[in-house]
Structure formats: structure tokens, C-alpha cells
Amino acid sequence: MKEFECYHGTSHENFLKIKSNGFIVKPRDDHWLGNGIYFFLDDIDKGRWWSRNNPYTRNNPTVIKIILKVFNENFLNLDVERDQSILDCFADEFRESLQELRVSIPGMNEHAWHCMVIDAFVKENPEYKAIARTFYTDRPVGASGFCGVGRQLCIHDKSLLSLNDLQEIRVKKTRRKRKRRSTS
């Protein structure tokens, strides 16, 4: 069993709705780990950043924290060779079936392809309830020489989430720097 410390950036109002009614998945065709509920792993600062910078949540930012437990057989870790190979084999077969059906998807970007493949994979393999992957951020390379990374977990099965275990962490809004007026 894997245990994850998860952070979801949102607004205080959304937190109250989620606490009462659960998470709502808003399908899009470009979610990079498929359609589901996204969390940053082990990094509250990325949850804070999301809640402050998302136009729908930045007026009253908050972070939801939850400790999630996922059985190994329900978890696809796209940071390890074995699980990448599982998804790659499926993607090869999926692409072939699209070609046999003469389905053309010109101009599809990388995230849209990931979303399509993972959504189809989870539909065909419902035992996979959560998928994780590390991503690069736009944080500049620092003096250490390391580029910025983050890790996300996408929950494809809401039964993994206990609403009673959700904790709210309020986020202070960032203040905009005021320009000094010239006194000349």
C-alpha cells in the first residue's frame, strides 16, 4: 500500500462545497494524466501557488490536504519503468485500433494525447484508480544546477477519497507591490 500526502489548490468556497458534496470532475480533453481529481504530492507550496494563481480561486485561496492510501495494484506510477511499459503497450494497441477504425487525430497536442490514452486505459483497466507522474516546472535552474519539478497524482476513482479526511489550509493572498510615485 502506498500512502501519499496530497494537496489540492482551490478556494475556500469550493472547499466547503467539496466537503459537503465531494469533488466534481470537470472533463477536459487536455488533462495530462486523464480526467480526474488532481493533487500535488508532498508539496504544499505548489498547492498554494495554484490557489493563488488560478483566476477562479485566487480571491479566497485555500489548499485541501488529505493523506491518501492506495493499494499497489490500484496505482500506476509513470515515474517507474514497469508502469510506463504497461501504459506504452496499451498506447500502442490503442493507436493501432484508431488506425484500423480510420480515426484521424491531426494536430493533437501532447497533453490531449495523454488524456485520451489514459482515459481509455482507465476505462479498460478500472483496477487503476490513481496515476502519478513527475513534471518539469518553469522554475529557473538555480545555483544547485537542478531544474524545477513537481509531482501530481490524478485520482480516477472517487472512492479513494474520504470527505471526512479533508483538511483546509487557508492561504494568504500575495500582495501586489505598489509602484512608488515619483516625488520630482
Image (tube, rainbow, N blue to C red):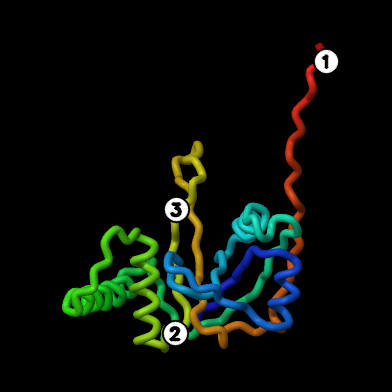
Q: Earlier in the sequence, mark 2 or mark 1?
A: 2
Point 24% across, 68% down: residue: 104
Label 1 Cα crowd, 10 Å radius (few <14 / some 14-19 / many 20+): few
Report the residue marked by disc 3: 136
57 left or right, relative to 90: right
Secondary structure at numbered mark 1:
loop
Q: Which circle, 1 or 3, is nearer the viewer?
A: 1
In-front residue for pair 83/144 = 83
Can you tell which quarter of the image residue 47 is in?
Answer: bottom right
Q: Please provide percent x and percent y for residue 15.
A: 72, 71
Point 72% across, 76% down: residue: 17
On residue 183, which mark appears?
Answer: 1
Q: Please provide percent x and percent y for residue 120.
A: 35, 79
Estimate the spatial distance between the alpha carbons at disc 3 and disc 2, rounded to whole Å.
Answer: 25 Å
Report the residue marked by disc 2: 74
* The C terminus: image quadrant: top right
Secondary structure at numbered mark 3:
strand
On screen, 179 above or below 120? above
On screen, 160 above or below 12? below
On screen, 129 above or below 154? below
In-front residue for pair 9/4 = 9
Q: Earlier in the sequence, mark 3 or mark 2?
A: 2
Q: Name the amino acid type tagged 1.
A: Thr
6 left or right, relative to 179: left
Estimate the spatial distance between the alpha carbons at disc 1 and disc 3, rounded to whole Å.
Answer: 44 Å
In-front residue for pair 165/97 = 97
